[in-house]
Amino acid sequence: AQSVTQLGSHVSVSEGALVLLRCNYSSSVPPYLFWYVQYPNQGLQLLLKYTSAATLVKGINGFEAEFKKSETSFHLTKPSAHMSDAAEYFCAVSESNTGGFKTIFGAGTRLFVKA
Amino acid sequence: NAGVTQTPKFRVLKTGQSMTLLCAQDMNHEYMYWYRQDPGMGLRLIHYSVGEGTTAKGEVPDGYNVSRLKKQNFLLGLESAAPSQTSVYFCASTRALYNEQFFGPGTRLTVL
């Protein structure tokens, strides 16, 4: 069965510092992986997705994530945090098996950016 | 393109009351979903639909019903609301399985 674990419900960084949000998944088949961002009082928006092409995926707003099969990880990074990055981030996994739908979301990590 | 819209944005119910949440999408997407979001639990799937006239149960379907009479609309019903259904409800749609989901702005429901 697939699952997603986001390490750290809250992460705090200073403006200009590296952002690292951790996501580990489990899946019995090659997964499709996603990172979504949720700003206050809004729905989720796609940041980036991995669909078995390049292992390093670039998304919007300077974010990127690297798929590491050996570590079953899909961590989200940004070299330099901006105040506008303060939001909640969700990692999600979809299995590529047929005959069924399953997208599982992690519990979320709230990112705080200090001036 | 309005994308995915949800009605209403906020609602307060008393225990035992019923209501329907409406989700509409104008992207001609086949798949539509209803999630609930609770603190520390991420999004949990309530029901979903893979096409007009079809629905299926998700992870937490109890106490909810859905209908998809038109491709662009997906309704979520609460027949007898309970305080445990206090949550933020999100509708989402996607063109095809395993593609990104497009989310509505959410409905904040409080059941007293």
Image: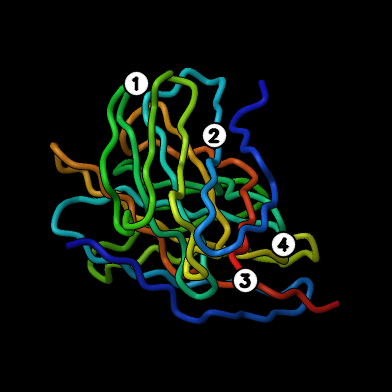
Are the numbered discs 2 and 1 placed on the same chain, yes or no?
yes
Task: Pick the residue in front: B101 or B78.
Answer: B78
- Of mark 2 and mark 1, the one earlier in the sequence is 2
Q: Mark 2 points at which residue?
A: B23
Quarter assignment of residue A74: bottom left
Distance from label 4 to label 3 (Cα)? 9 Å
Q: Is mark 4 on a helix, strand or loop?
A: helix
Are the numbered discs 2 and 3 placed on the same chain, yes or no?
no
Of tags 2 and 3, the one toward the viewer is 2
Tag 4 and tag 3, C-beta contact below 8 Å:
yes
Quarter assignment of residue A27: bottom left
Residue, far right:
A115
| Mark 1 residue crowding within 10 angstroms, few (<14) / some (14–19) / many (20+) | some
Output the chain of dot 4: A
| Mark 3 residue crowding within 10 angstroms, few (<14) / some (14–19) / many (20+) | many
Distance from label 3 to label 1 (Cα)? 42 Å
Residue, far front:
B16
Distance from label 1 to label 4 (Cα)? 37 Å
Output the chain of dot 1: B
Check disc 1 and give the amino acid type.
Glu
Of tags 3 and 1, the one toward the viewer is 1
Is A110 drawn above or below residue B74 in the view shown? below
Check disc 2 and give the amino acid type.
Cys
Residue found 53% across the figure and 41% down from its top: B20
Task: Give how far across and how far down residue A96 sits, in percent.
Answer: 21, 43
Is A8 drawn above or below residue B11 in the view shown? below
Of tags 1 and 4, the one toward the viewer is 1
Q: Residue A19 carries which label?
A: 3
Task: Pick the residue in front: B48 or A61.
Answer: B48
Of tags 2 and 4, the one toward the viewer is 2
Q: Name the residue under label 4.
A: A85
